[in-house]
Image (cartoon, rainbow, N blue to C red):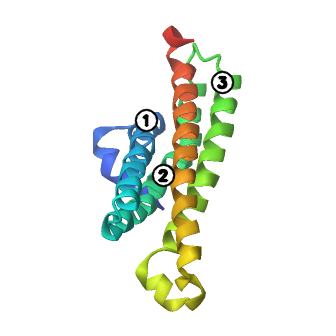
Amino acid sequence: MLFEFVRGILQPMNTNGAQIHLLLNHFPVVGFPIVLFALLWGLLRHQNQVFLFGAYLTILVWATTLASYLTGEDAEDVLKELPSFNSKQLIHTHEDTALWAMILSSVLAVVALLMLPGIVKLLPQLQNPKFQKSLRWALVVGVVAVSGILALAAHQGGLIVHTEIR
């Protein structure tokens, strides 16, 4: 549904699946390091509102990760039609890494949801300060990990078409 929405916006520009994928995949690669900065700023300076901004941003960047992941197959279809295409193994390696990034970012989105004030009020067991502190550090460590995985996936994606960096 999200892909169809984006496609509807970009259709007048005569875009294909590969172009949409390339447009979207930069958001999580850049977004998660920005999330990390907000989380660390809030955590280390004891500014809860900044940390919560980072949690909300985690959910937003996860949505861009999902959109990027879901557009990957359409990008692959476009590449397979190119006469010079010979990168099947590179695509599958990129897909596998992207899947891990998608899974981890999904877990991080759930962790971020568990920190939001409205959810914490609904579920009293989440109000334990030690549990919240553990969630905060889990989110920070997870964002570091997903940033690394996304950097690897981005590099692998670049190898598919950019023969000059192989």
Return the x and y of residue 60 as percentages of the image width and height.
41, 60
Q: Residues within 10 Å of mark 1 (few under 14, many from 20)?
A: some
Task: Give the quadrant of the C terminus.
Answer: top right
Q: Earlier in the sequence, mark 1 or mark 3?
A: 1
Identity, as a three-letter code, of the amino acid under mark 1: Leu
What amino acid is at disc 3?
Answer: Leu
Q: Nearer the viewer, residue 44 or 16?
A: 44
Please state which of residues 40 and 153 is positioned toward the viewer in this rendering.
40
Q: Residue at x 35, y 70 (%)?
A: 48
- Tag 1 and tag 2, C-beta contact below 8 Å: no
Q: Quadrant of residue 118?
A: bottom left
Contact, mark 1 vs mark 3 (Cβ under 8 Å): no
> Disc 3 and disc 2: Cα gap in Å?
21 Å
Horizontal side of 23 relative to 112 (left or right) equals left
| Label 2: which secondary element | helix
- In three-dimensional space, the C-alpha distance between marks 1 and 3, rounded to whole angstroms, equals 16 Å
Depth check: 107 or 82 in front? 107
Residue receiving disc 1 = 22
Residue under label 3: 90
Label ID, residue 104? none
Residue positioned 34% across, 46% down in the render:
11
Q: Residue placed at 34% from the left, 64% from the top?
A: 53
CA separation in Å, label 1 and label 2: 11 Å
- Give how far across and how far down residue 9 sits, in percent: 31, 52
Q: Is residue 166 above or below residue 65?
A: above
Rendered image: mark on residue 67 = 2
From what the image shows, is residue 156 above or below residue 144? above
> Element at badge 3?
helix
Residue 71: x and y in percent read 52, 45
N-terminal-most mark, 1 or 2:
1
